[in-house]
Amino acid sequence: MDLNLTGKVAVVTGASKGIGLACAEALAWEGATVFGISRDPVHLGKAREELSAKGLELIPELADLTDPEATAAAFARIGVPDILINCAGAARQIPVDELSSTTLHAAMESKYFTYMHATEAVVRPMAERGSGAIVNVVGQGGKSANPLHIGGGAANAALMLASMGYAKAYAGQGVRVNVINPGLTLTGRVDDRLDAATRASGRPREELLAGMVADIPLGRAGDPAEVANVAVFLASPKASYVNGAIIAMDGGATGVI
C-alpha cells in the first residue's frame, strides 16, 4: 500500500534504536525525509549507518529532549515537520521497595516530558499551517498497574491523557494525535524489565521471560517493525479520520476495554 508519504518531512524521537529506529526505517521506505533525534551520538551514528546500508537516509539530530530549550532548538533547525513520531525516553522498571521521589521524578522526566517537549515544539506550528500528524508510542503499562512500573506507568497514563487533550484541541486545525501502546516488544527495554523483575522476585530471567510470553494470547513478543508499521500508517493520509485513538499492540495480553 502506498501511504502517500513521498516528500513528507518526518521526525522520529528516540530514533537510534528499538521501535524508534524501526519507525525511521519504515518512514524512509515510504519516501519520507526522516530526521532522527537522539541524545546518544554513538547509537545515532550506528542507526544512520544501518539505514544507509539498506539504501535509506536518516538525518541525525542530537538533542536531549528532557531539556525544553534544547528540544526547541533542535526543531528550529529542522523546521516544522509533517509527521512527529515520539519514541524517545523510557522510564526504568524499579521494584517498589526501591522507589523514591527521585526515581519518580526521573520517570516523568525521561518519558512524559520528552514527549511533551517535542509535541510543544511542533503542534502549534502544525496547526498554523493547517496540517500535521503526531503519533506517541507510549505503552500498555499506563493502563495496567504493575508494582515494578509505578513511575513509568504513571508517565504513560499521563501521556495518554495529554495526547487525547491535544487531539481534541487541534483536530479542527488539521492536526491529528494518536497513541500506540506496545506490550512486550523485543527491544533492549526487555532487559531492563527482566532485571527489575529478577531483583523483586529472585527468579531467573529465563523463567520470568517465559512467563511473560505465556501471558500473551498470540504466544510471542512483538517485533519493533510491527509497531512501526502501525505508527507510520497512523501518521499517513490513509488514516485521515483517525484522531484521538489509543491502539493496543500487546498480542491481546491486556484485557482492557
Image (cartoon, rainbow, N blue to C red):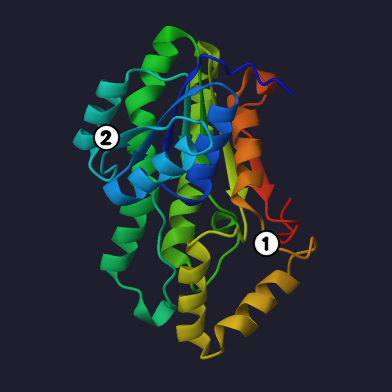
Q: Position of residue 108 (x, y in %)?
A: 35, 54
Mark 2 vs mark 1: give the one in front: 1
Q: Picture quarter containing residue 168?
A: top right
Residue pointed to by mark 2: 71
Element on which disc 1 rests: loop
**Residue 180 as seen in the image, left or right of residue 98:** right
Ranked by sequence position, the earlier of labels 2 and 1 is 2
Q: Position of residue 189 (x, y in %)?
A: 48, 62
Point out the image quarter for the N terminus.
Answer: top right
Q: Position of residue 232 (x, y in %)?
A: 60, 31
Crowd band around label 2 with a 10 angstrom C-alpha radius: few (<14), some (14–19), many (20+): many
Q: Position of residue 3 (x, y in %)?
A: 66, 21
Q: Is the residue 175 above or below the residue 65 in the image?
A: above
Q: Are marks 2 and 1 in contact (CB under 8 Å)?
A: no
Q: Is the residue 245 above or below the residue 146 in the image?
A: above
**Residue 212 as seen in the image, left or right of residue 114:** right
Q: Amino acid at mark 2?
A: Thr
Crowd band around label 1 with a 10 angstrom C-alpha radius: few (<14), some (14–19), many (20+): many
The residue depicted at 30 percent of the width and 72 percent of the height is: 100
Closer to us: 226 or 171: 226
Residue pointed to by mark 1: 221
Q: What is the C-alpha distance between the residues marked 2 and 1? A: 32 Å
The residue depicted at 52 percent of the width and 31 percent of the height is: 55
The residue depicted at 51 percent of the width and 79 percent of the height is: 197
Element on which disc 2 rests: helix
Q: Amino acid at mark 1?
A: Ala
Instruction: Single out the residue that lies furthest toward the bottom.
Output: 202
Residue 15 visible in the shown view: no
Closer to us: 215 or 13: 13
The residue depicted at 35 percent of the width and 74 percent of the height is: 99
Number of numbered tags placed on the structure image: 2
The label number, if any, that marks residue 80 in the structure image: none
